[in-house]
Image (spheres, helix red, strand yellow):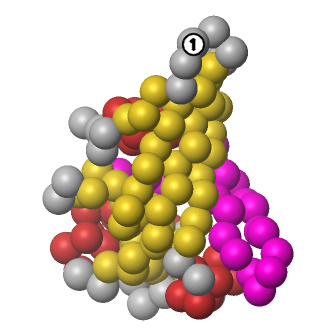
Amino acid sequence: MSKVVDFLNSSKVFYLATVDGDKARVRPINSVIEYNGKIYFETSSQKDMYKQMLINPNVAISGMADSKWIRVTGKAVMDENPEAVQAMFDAIPALKDVYSREEFKVYYLEEMKAVVYSFQSEPEELEN
């Protein structure tokens, strides 16, 4: 499994920043999977974060675990493939209780860069 997914899962809750006009918007998220060699996240078409990513796909994600923190950056790419949606539902079944299939959206990061930082060592760039 991806080191990035492992780190984010160990964080339990991590944070997604989007761009809203000229302002940054940050919110907690906690769903991440690896699918077809890409790292996927989820949202709802009803949420502002979804609408913000459609306008400006540049995002940043950050989480902390074991006295280290990760910064993941890239461009959100919405994936309408029903198999990608099903992969997220299969990995995290509780999402079926929260979202309807119509509003449920999955996305991966293009041009993704992930770096782990700590006070004890040099930054480490992670591969997918």
| On screen, residue 1 above or below 51 | above
| On screen, residue 4 above or below 116 | below
Question: Magenta stretch?
Answer: 12-33
Magenta span: chief secondary structure? strand
| On screen, residue 85 above or below 71 | below
Q: Judge from the rendering whether residue 121 lies leftward or rightward of residue 1; answer left or right.
A: right
Quadrant in the picture for the N terminus: top left
Q: Is 26 inside the magenta-drawn segment?
A: yes
Residue under the point 82% across and 75% down? 23
Q: Which residue is mark 1?
A: 121
Q: Specify the quadrant of the image occupied by residue 44.
A: bottom right
Q: Position of residue 24 (x, y in %)?
A: 78, 69
Residue under the point 30% across and 44% down? 128
Residue under the point 66% across and 52% down? 15
Q: Specify the quadrant of the image occupied by residue 92.
A: bottom left
Label 1 secondary element:
loop
Q: Position of residue 94 (x, y in %)?
A: 46, 58
